[in-house]
Image (cartoon, grey):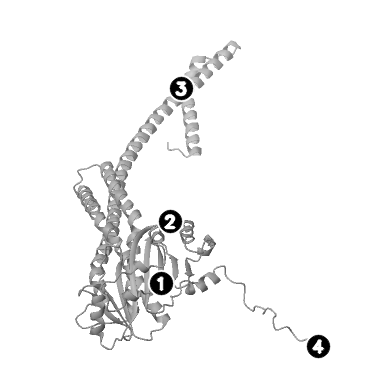
Amino acid sequence: MKSASPAMTPVSVLPSDDALRQELHNEVHARPSARIRLPALVVFVAVLNKGVSRQQECEHLQRLPRQSHLTVDDLQHNFLRLRFADHTVKWERHSEFTRYSIVQPLPPGALLGASEPELLASLRVDPDWLRGIPGHTVAAVKLAMVEHDLSDPHAALALGQQWLGGPTVVASLMGNGHSMAVTNFRLRASGFERMLVIAAPGTSETRAGRVSQRLLELEIYRLMALRGLPVAKALAPTLAESEAALAEVTASLENRQVSETELLDRLIHVAARVERATAEHLYRFSATQAYEALVRQRIAELRERPIPGTTTLGEFMQRRLSPAIATVAATAQRLASLSQRIERASALLRTRVDIATEAQNQQLLAKLTRGQALQLNMQATVEGLSIAAISYYVVSLVLYLGKALKSAGLNINPELCAGASIPLVLWVVWQATRRIHARLQLPH
């Protein structure tokens, strides 16, 4: 007897898969955290990708050594990690921006104890390649990650201040004290800002990767959230003008000194301006709220512990970010409120027009009623004349009939017969007219 082959394909006991099952299931693995061996340097650049196609980004990645085989299909999952001898290049595409990260060993002269060390001189990729990334830079960070004892946080912080080149820094311990983040959020002449992570000795590569990802995402999401602030400021004069114009329309509705046509024209002008602003900027305001929520989430994931005398990253960001987010939210609410007020003013104007139209319709009906009454009177007069005319023709026939009978030899007076038949003819014609009215259900 032959035994069953162990390599047989298992028979599925499930219904057929939904078309999106594989894609949605694998989304959790779409952007895995990097594994970073300390000490390391992470050069992070994020660019706005509006108008930049995947084909352009693929062609740029092909310029890296031994990557000419890349195709657009390799970029379909919005994530790509390219491994080289002693560094990696990571590409990630998002809805509004694309991130490029280069992870490489930290130069020996950039370890703790150095003061504002040069970092780009040892960059593993060609600076021209970095400069040629398609898109416009929105964030650029040089993140150095080193190991050092954190039993004395103040001593470690002093080394971090020296490394950044100034005493004014923002710092906090993360997690259960496994690492310290130090930065000053300042743009340097190179266009980069610097961050320093001091990790406890023995920090695993996966933890170092998660820490770097959270810090870099915190910065890019902060900057993307702030993109709504200039829009809100630029929109303020337009909103003020629209509110003033709407107030004038409402006042004119109240005092009834302006015609409905003119009011409608002015209201349409204000409504069009507001709807245009809504169509152009609503996405930006919604995106600001979404990015701000991501900033809060990343801050929570850092699980910061304060260092006495130093502002934490979360406190610094919330202090600087909250007013801007509040301004954007207030502008979005102001825009929505203005749209609702325009809708109410439009309803009031429509009610006023309906009332005026109803009054005009009543006047028109009154005129039609008077016209119909006059027409009925004229019709009764015509009918009276018709009875007389018909009777006249019938009496004439009686007269001609009498003359014919007289000519035939009968001794009659045709004129007398005709005169005598007039009452009878009038009564018969009148009765016939009444019967016709009754059959047609006409008033008589």
Counting from the top left corner in percent of width and height, residue 421 is at 49, 22
Q: Residues within 10 Å of mark 1 (few under 14, many from 20)?
A: many
Name the amino acid type tagged 3.
Ala
- Residue 52 bears which disc, if any? 2
Q: Amino acid at mark 1?
A: Val
Q: Report x, y in % for residue 266.
A: 26, 45
Please report whichever mark, 1 or 2, sits nearer to the chain's N-terminal start: 2
Dot placed on the residue nearer the N-terminal end, 1 or 4:
4
Measured in 3D between alpha carbons, the distance from the residue under mark 1 to the one under mark 2, in whole angstroms, is: 24 Å
Give the residue pinned by disc 1.
103
**Which element is circle 1 on?**
strand
Eye-nearest disc, 2 or 4: 2
Relative to 216, is 428 on the left or the right? right
Q: Secondary structure at mark 3?
A: helix
User: Amino acid type of disc 2?
Assistant: Val
Q: Counting other residues with Cα less than 10 Å from the Cα at mark 2, is it few (<14), some (14-19), or many (20 or more)?
A: some
Between marks 1 and 4 in the image, the one whose residue lies nearer the viewer: 1
SS of the residue under disc 4: loop
**Residue 58 makes an appearance in the image:** yes
Q: Residue furthest front?
A: 109
Q: Residue at label 3?
A: 389
Q: Which residue is mark 4?
A: 1
Image depth: mark 1 or mark 3 in front: 1
Label 3 or label 2, whichever comes before in sequence order: 2
**How far is mark 3 from mark 4, CA to CA?**
123 Å
